[in-house]
Image (cartoon, rainbow, N blue to C red):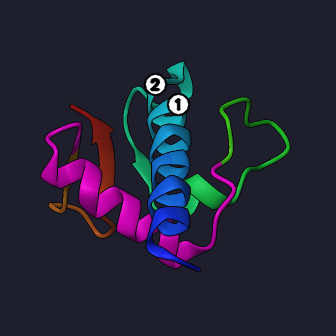
């Protein structure tokens, strides 16, 4: 994939992450697995990307100050900033 395609893809994934974190179900944050694995009862949008792309997008969103990370528990939790 060329860089332009990669940039467009990461922007798409970032938008999906922000949509998932903006959903009322994500008020108390989301674990990493919650972005790509939805349970039947979940109503928030799924992030349609491979895990590495989700990680890369999350890193960029954290660097941009749009997402924050809480690592005080057993698993990291992501929040909308």
Residue 49 on image: x %, y %: 64, 64
Q: Which residue is mark 1?
A: 19
Q: Which residues are magenta?
A: 47-67
Helix, strand or loop at label 2? It is: helix
Quadrant assignment, res 42? top right
Residue 5, quarter of picture: bottom right
Horizontal side of 70 relative to 42 (left or right) equals left
- Any part of residue 67 in sight: yes
Give the labeled residue for mark 2.
22
Q: In front: 30, or 74?
A: 30
Residue 81 lies in quadrant: top left
Quick check: 79 above or below 5? above
Residue depicted at 44% across the width and 47% down the height: 14
Q: 36 or 26, which is in the foreground?
A: 36
Q: Is residue 80 above or below residue 3?
A: above
Quadrant assignment for the N terminus: bottom right
User: Does the magenta run of residues contain 62?
Assistant: yes
Residue at horizontal 18%, vertical 62%?
71
Contact check, label 2 and label 1, Cβ < 8 Å: yes
The relative height of residue 60 versus residue 15 in the rendered view (above or below) is below
Q: Residues within 10 Å of mark 1 (few under 14, many from 20)?
A: some
Residue 6 versus residue 35 in the image, above or below? below
Q: Residue furthest top?
A: 24
Q: Is residue 67 left or right of residue 65?
A: right
- Disc 2: CA contacts within 10 A as few (<14), some (14-19) or many (>=20): some
**Residue drawn 38% across the image and 40% down it:** 29
């Amino acid at each position: 994939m060329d860089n332009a395609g990669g940039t467009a893809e990461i922007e798409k994934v970032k938008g999906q992450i922000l949509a998932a974190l903006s959903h009322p179900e994500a008020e108390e944050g989301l674990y990493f697995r919650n972005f790509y694995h939805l349970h039947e009862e979940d109503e928030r949008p799924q992030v349609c990307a491979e895990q590495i792309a989700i990680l890369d997008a999350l890193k960029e969103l954290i660097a941009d100050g749009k997402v924050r990370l809480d690592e005080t528990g057993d698993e990291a939790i992501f929040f909308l900033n």
